[in-house]
Image (cartoon, rainbow, N blue to C red):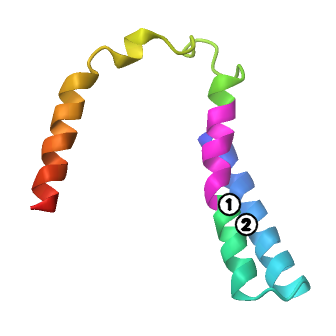
Amino acid sequence: IIAYVAAVSLGVHVFLSWLLTVHFNFGITGAMTSSLVVHWLPNIAQLLFVMCGGCKETWRGFSMLAFKDLWPVFKLSLSSGGMLCL
């Protein structure tokens, strides 16, 4: 799925870049808009793939098991953030 999404994303990027910069004459604003859309496209596509049934063997929905070992990760994040601030 990642390869397909990347190929579609590349095609959309080329088309939107041409459309917004050349055809509509938006210049840098059009190029940045195209880049913004194309950078979000793979994330949204993969989220939809997982949550909407493309991945039936792995997705069981949210449960409390996802938060089981969250406290050690939180402590490590807090100490890492503190060291970065100092």
Regarding residue 7, the answer to whether it shows in the image is yes
Tell me whether circle 1 and circle 2 mark residues in contact (CB < 8 Å). yes
Q: In the rendered view, does 2 fall on the left or right side of 84?
A: right
What span is in magenta?
Answer: 39-48
Image quadrant in which the C terminus is located? bottom left
Where residue 80 sits in the image (x, y, percent)? 15, 48
Where residue 17 sits in the image (x, y, percent)? 76, 76
Looking at the image, is 70 positioned above or below residue 27?
above
Where residue 58 sits in the image (x, y, percent)? 54, 15
Q: Secondary structure at mark 2?
A: helix
Looking at the image, is 37 positioned above or below residue 80?
below
Q: Which mark is residue 13?
A: 2
Q: Which mark is residue 57?
A: none
Q: CA distance from mark 1 to mark 2?
A: 6 Å
At 70% from the left and 56% from the top, the residue drawn is 9
Q: Which mark is residue 38?
A: 1
Main SS class of the magenta portion in the image: helix
- Three-letter amino acid code at disc 1? Val
- Using a 10 Å C-alpha cutoff, classify the residue at mark 1 as few (fewer than 14 neighbours), some (14 to 19) or many (20 or more): many
As drawn, the residue found furthest toward the right would be 23
Q: Quadrant of residue 56?
A: top right
Q: In the rendered view, does 27 fall on the left or right side of 1?
A: right
Regarding residue 1, the answer to whether it shows in the image is no
At 85% from the left and 89% from the top, the residue drawn is 25
Q: Quadrant of residue 60?
A: top right
Q: Is 28 part of what is drawn in magenta?
A: no
Image quadrant in which the N terminus is located? top right
